[in-house]
Image: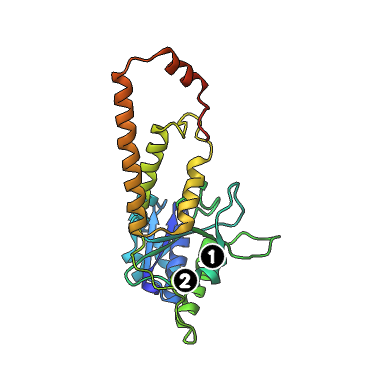
Amino acid sequence: MLDQIRIVMIQTTHPGNIGAVARAMKNMGLVDLCLVDPKKFPDPEADARASGATDILASAQVVSTLQEAISDCHFVVGTSARGRHIPWPITSPREMAGVAMQLQPGKKMAILFGREDRGLTNEELHQCHHHVHIPTNPDFSSLNVAAAVQVIAYELRVASLDKHSEPALQWGTDWDIDLADVREIELMFDHLEKTLVDVEFLDPNNPRQLMTRMRRLFLRAIPDRVEVNVMRGMLTAINKKVTLLNNASIDKPASSSDSEAQLKKEPPYV
């Protein structure tokens, strides 16, 4: 299971923190490190703080965007130290490790760690299925990023070494279809947003929080590939119907009753 976990660090400022994370990972048997737009890497300070875990640094992926880091992952967790305006499913590190034990063979789980000064943005957290919160002292809750990785990595290792418990079955049963990966889900969200605009349910000039709430709905369900394909098939059918109706309205001269009905139509809910 540990080989299926990817630690993702986003825009890390201090290279020493990258080295300390590599050390924490190697201590607990994790090997997959991905760095999103680090300020300084490679760097001698990262090597020094790694204290012998330079192989983790040498094999680390360095990418420009979060999407590159997680596009092939099937479950994404974001670390968050505070509540958000729109609540998201939250787990403890121990509960998160239990979820990791449910990963199907060959599937990837990404755990995101944000910037030293402000953590993850709301947009980055909206890419996640769940958020994980380390229950620190509320009077002094700020954790160094390497210390946070150490806590998470420890719980993952303990879960992987527990000989007395079998991995829990996803949703209480063997699942018949592979989970959709992030790339497939993001394509679905793009398709959904375009369709909602086309049917005038979403106002692109005043979107409010509609797509954020739709993200929460679908990510909370952890959809599999067939479910994502069914959803996109439904959207494609809607797209075709909208195109036919639009073409028919172009061919048909507007009557006074049509105009009155249009004026009376309620504005879309957003």
Judge the density around disc 1: few (<14), some (14-19), many (≥20) Cα neighbours within 10 Å: some
Q: In this picture, is 123 found above or below 173?
A: above
Q: Nearer the viewer, residue 34 or 195?
A: 195
Residue placed furthest toward the bottom: 164
Q: Nearer the viewer, residue 53 or 166?
A: 166
Q: CA distance from mark 1 to mark 2?
A: 10 Å
Identify the residue shown where x is 50% and y is 34%: 207
The local secondary structure at tag 1 comes to helix
Residue placed furthest toward the right: 139
Identify the residue shown where x is 47% and y is 71%: 24
Q: In this picture, is 42 found above or below 210?
A: below
Q: Amino acid at mark 1?
A: Ala
Q: Is residue 241 visible?
A: yes
Task: Tell me the tag on residue 148.
Answer: 1
Give x and y (percent) for residue 68.
Answer: 34, 52
Quarter of the image holding residue 54? bottom left
Q: In this picture, is 260 found above or below 244?
A: above
Q: How many marks?
A: 2
Task: Tell me the tag on residue 60.
Answer: none
Q: Is residue 125 visible?
A: no
Give x and y (percent) for residue 214.
Answer: 48, 46
Q: Which residue is mark 2?
A: 24
- Marks 1/2 in contact by CB < 8 Å: the verdict is no
The local secondary structure at tag 2 comes to helix
Q: Amino acid at mark 2?
A: Ala
Q: In this picture, is 40 found above or below 96?
A: above
What colouring method underlies this structural image? rainbow
Looking at the rendered image, the quarter that the N terminus falls into is bottom left
Identify the residue shown where x is 62% and y is 53%: 83
Identify the residue shown where x is 36% and y is 65%: 108
Give x and y (percent) for residue 14.
Answer: 47, 56
Q: Earlier in the sequence, mark 1 or mark 2?
A: 2
